[in-house]
Image (spheres, rainbow, N blue to C red):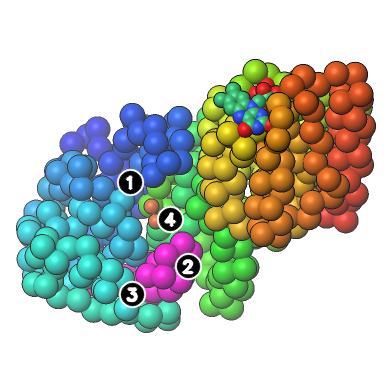
Amino acid sequence: MDQKDENLEIAKGIYWVGAVDWNLRDFHGYATPRGGTYNAYLIIDEKITLIDTVKAEFASEMIERIRRIVNPSKIDYVISNHVEMDHSSGLPALMELAKDATVFCTKHGKAGLNEYYESGGCSNWNFEVVKTGDELNIGSRNMMFIETPMLHWPDSMQTYLKEDKILFSNDAFGQHLATSTRFEDEVEGGAMEDAAIYYANILMPFGSKVIKYAEKVTELGLEFDMIAPSHGVIWREDPSRIIDAYLKWAQKEVVPKVLIIYDTMWNSTEIMAKEILEGVREGGVEARLFHLRKNDWSMMVKELMYSPVIAIGSPTMHGTMFYTVSGFLTYMRGLRPKDKSAVVFGSYGWGGGAVKGIEEILEKARFDIVEPGLQAKYRPYEDDLRACRELGIRLAELALKKSSYLRPAR
Ligand SMILES: Cc1cc2nc3c(=O)[nH]c(=O)nc-3n(C[C@H](O)[C@H](O)[C@H](O)COP(=O)(O)O)c2cc1C
Ligand SMILES: [Fe+2]
Ligand SMILES: [Fe+2]
């Protein structure tokens, strides 16, 4: 191994062999302004073991990293924690070289890999299906598998390296972040905020599973020296911090904050949004304002996680809400946020329709619509503006009330 790669040995005999995607800006619709990483880990022991792979376009980079440590044909075991293609599409190229390797995965993992890679030679791979508590000896080390169904796919699992106390957690605890270091404690400002964005966009619907998972980890008595996810940096300094943060997000801790999300064609809805914000400010509560075509939706849903109250604004266009609003509502609903209070506002010219349409969707998504929507014809004038400001004050009060029985999230 070259001198320059020494920092890729994350613990004795355990190497990072993944790929950094510095220019990733969109991960299946999730905005990634700081790039991304696909982590794969190679363990050199009596049995040479690879944990996960990378996205297909980086497979040769991963294989080259492996080759600098060991001939890839010498790999005995491949642990496939998750079938999603960002971690598995590098497998066919790897398995071409490591023909005799055994692939360890869950039952759903095996089925998923067969669906994806039938034409990638999957039918020739040796599979071993594992479940929670199963152990695998690789020489001086033992691995234990932990199924994590719906965190975030049915097949998801994690691998715990007992002697080294390293948890290879796959997507859970990850962050979309491109860095030159592999450790969270070496990243300026840490990676907690990026982990929160990741949680909000990928794991928010599965909060109850996160709580159960944390209970399982406690029951198994697992201790962690490192938590090594499949995206972003490794948690090394007090690694349980990230499990505690997940629990906090899963338990839906909120802060006194009002989220205002809107779109606008001729700025009337925007004027209303800003006036609501003034009211919230007057009410002594922080507000965040997001124009739907000028902000990343992935950042907005992170704010949604912390905000007990949300105001959504839209002009009426062709009898209905503006198209970005319906897109955002679709995205937001899928994440199944809970215990959120909402109010709707917007400007219209004649028949209207946006406010009603949004309210219908929010009701179906079980948002608590606290009062009828505010509407301004063409341009908001004094009365409309006063109504917006007063609404803001009421929303601030509500945000305070809804947060008072909960500890602050940050
Ligand atoms: C392309 C277009 C279609 C519109 N369709 C409707 C409509 O179907 N019903 C309605 O009440 N107003 C309609 N309007 C009027 C807008 O709702 C109105 O101008 C409103 O004040 C715009 O708010 P904004 O400044 O926040 O974009 C339409 C406006 C545009 C530009
Ligand atoms: Fe995934
Ligand atoms: Fe992933």
Looking at the rendered structure, which numbered label has been put on residue 38?
1
Q: How far is disc 3 from disc 4 in space, using C-alphas?
A: 16 Å
Q: Which structural element holds mark 4?
A: loop
- The residues colored magenta run 139-160
Q: How far is disc 4 from disc 1 in space, using C-alphas?
A: 10 Å
Please state which of residues 98 and 164 is positioned toward the viewer in this rendering. 98
332 versus 284 height, above or below = below
Q: Amino acid at mark 3?
A: His
Looking at the rendered structure, which numbered label has been put on residue 150?
2
Q: Which residue is mark 3?
A: 108
Please state which of residues 259 and 154 is positioned toward the viewer in this rendering. 259
Query: Does the segment drawn in magenta span residue 147?
Result: yes
Asked whether mark 1 and ligand 3 are closer than 8 Å, the reply comes as: yes
Of the numbered discs 1 and 2, the one sitting upstream in the chain is: 1
Asked whether mark 4 and ligand 2 are closer than 8 Å, the reply comes as: yes
Looking at the rendered structure, which numbered label has been put on residue 171?
4
**Circles 3, 4 touching at the beta carbon (< 8 Å):** no
The answer to which image quadrant residue 214 occupies is: bottom right
**Circles 1, 2 touching at the beta carbon (< 8 Å):** no
Q: Position of residue 221 (x, y in %)?
A: 56, 74
Of the numbered discs 3 and 2, the one sitting upstream in the chain is: 3
**Circles 4, 2 touching at the beta carbon (< 8 Å):** no
Q: Position of residue 29 (x, y in %)?
A: 43, 41
**Circles 4, 1 touching at the beta carbon (< 8 Å):** no
Specify whether 175 is left or right of 272. left
Q: How far is disc 3 from disc 2 in space, using C-alphas?
A: 11 Å
Q: Nearer the viewer, mark 3 or mark 4?
A: 3
Of the numbered discs 3 and 1, the one sitting upstream in the chain is: 1
Q: Amino acid at mark 2?
A: Met
Q: State whether residue 165 appears in this view.
A: no
